[in-house]
Image (spheres, grey):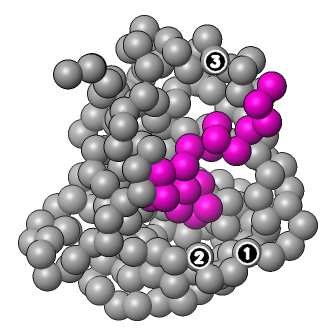
């Protein structure tokens, strides 16, 4: 599936609650999201990034696991997530986004997050995530709320990126994966 690039209106909309009973092809959609994310070499993908205004995202931080390190990655589907709590002193980490190719910036986020969500089979879960897992979840959660990582930048930093953002919006970039650019009706 193509990934919707910066400038697409769906990326700035809050997603709708996913109704399990009304969504018959959920397993196929989620598999397509995994395939799309992996082909773009991402670690997370939200439904708005493929043009669907739904509260749904997938995360796989296992590629960050290194032998001998204590970090344990996750591979999970998050449906209708709700942040219950964020804690800890925010820490900076360089983030990027598949919808905004080749732009990265340090973003401050709290290191702990408590999330209530449904898994792919409809089970309601509540979990605490920390570190890199929490960060990737927060990034994807922002997507289902209509927030992009660049919205969290200081105005000066965002202005410094504006030329590149305008090029993405106009479709004047190249990428290693399929992108869908906004075309005014």
- The disc placed on residue 83 is 2
Residue placed at 42% from the left, 57% from the top? 14
Residue 67 visible in the displayed image: no
What secondary structure is found at the residue carrying circle 3?
helix
Q: Residue 175 at x, y = what percent?
A: 43, 20
Whether 143 is among the magenta residues is yes
- Tell me the chief SS of the magenta region: helix
What secondary structure is found at the residue carrying circle 1?
strand
Whether 117 is among the magenta residues is no
Q: Which residue is mark 1?
A: 86
Quarter-of-image position of residue 58: bottom left
- C-alpha distance separating marks 1 and 2: 7 Å
Q: Circles 1 and 2: CB distance less than 8 Å?
A: yes
Q: Which residue is mark 3?
A: 162
Residue placed at 80% from the left, 52% from the top? 108
Packing grade of label 1 (10 A; few <14, some 14-19, many >=20) is: some
Q: Residue 168 at x, y = what percent?
A: 47, 18
Number of numbered tags placed on the structure image: 3
Badge 3 or badge 1: first in the primary sequence: 1
Query: Is 9 on the left-hand or right-hand side of 23?
Result: right
- C-alpha distance separating marks 3 and 2: 30 Å
Q: Nearer the viewer, residue 36 or 124?
A: 124
What secondary structure is found at the residue carrying circle 2?
strand
Packing grade of label 3 (10 A; few <14, some 14-19, many >=20) is: few
Query: Is 127 on the left-hand or right-hand side of 135?
Result: left
Range drawn in magenta: 137-156
Badge 3 or badge 2: first in the primary sequence: 2
**Relative vertical location of residue 59 with respect to residue 32 in this rendering, above or below:** below
**Relative vertical location of residue 182 with respect to residue 17 in this rendering, above or below:** above
Query: Is 162 on the left-hand or right-hand side of 178?
Result: right
Quarter-of-image position of residue 65: bottom right
């Amino acid at each position: 599936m193509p990934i919707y690039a910066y400038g697409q209106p769906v990326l700035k909309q809050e997603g709708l609650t996913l109704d399990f009973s009304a969504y018959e092809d959920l397993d196929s959609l989620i598999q397509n999201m995994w395939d799309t994310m992996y082909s773009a070499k991402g670690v997370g993908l939200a439904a708005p990034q493929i043009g669907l205004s739904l509260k749904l995202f997938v995360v796989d931080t296992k590629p960050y696991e290194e032998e001998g390190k204590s970090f344990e990655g996750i591979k999970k589907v998050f449906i209708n997530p709700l942040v219950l709590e964020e804690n800890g002193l925010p820490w900076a980490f360089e983030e990027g986004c598949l919808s905004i190719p080749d732009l990265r910036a340090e973003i401050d986020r709290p290191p702990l997050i408590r999330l209530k969500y449904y898994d792919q089979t409809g089970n309601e879960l509540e979990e605490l995530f920390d570190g890199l897992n929490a960060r990737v979840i927060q990034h994807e959660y922002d997507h289902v709320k209509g927030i992009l990582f660049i919205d969290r930048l200081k105005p000066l930093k965002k202005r410094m990126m504006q030329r590149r953002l305008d090029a993405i919006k106009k479709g004047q970039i190249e990428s290693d994966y399929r992108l869908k650019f906004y075309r005014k009706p």
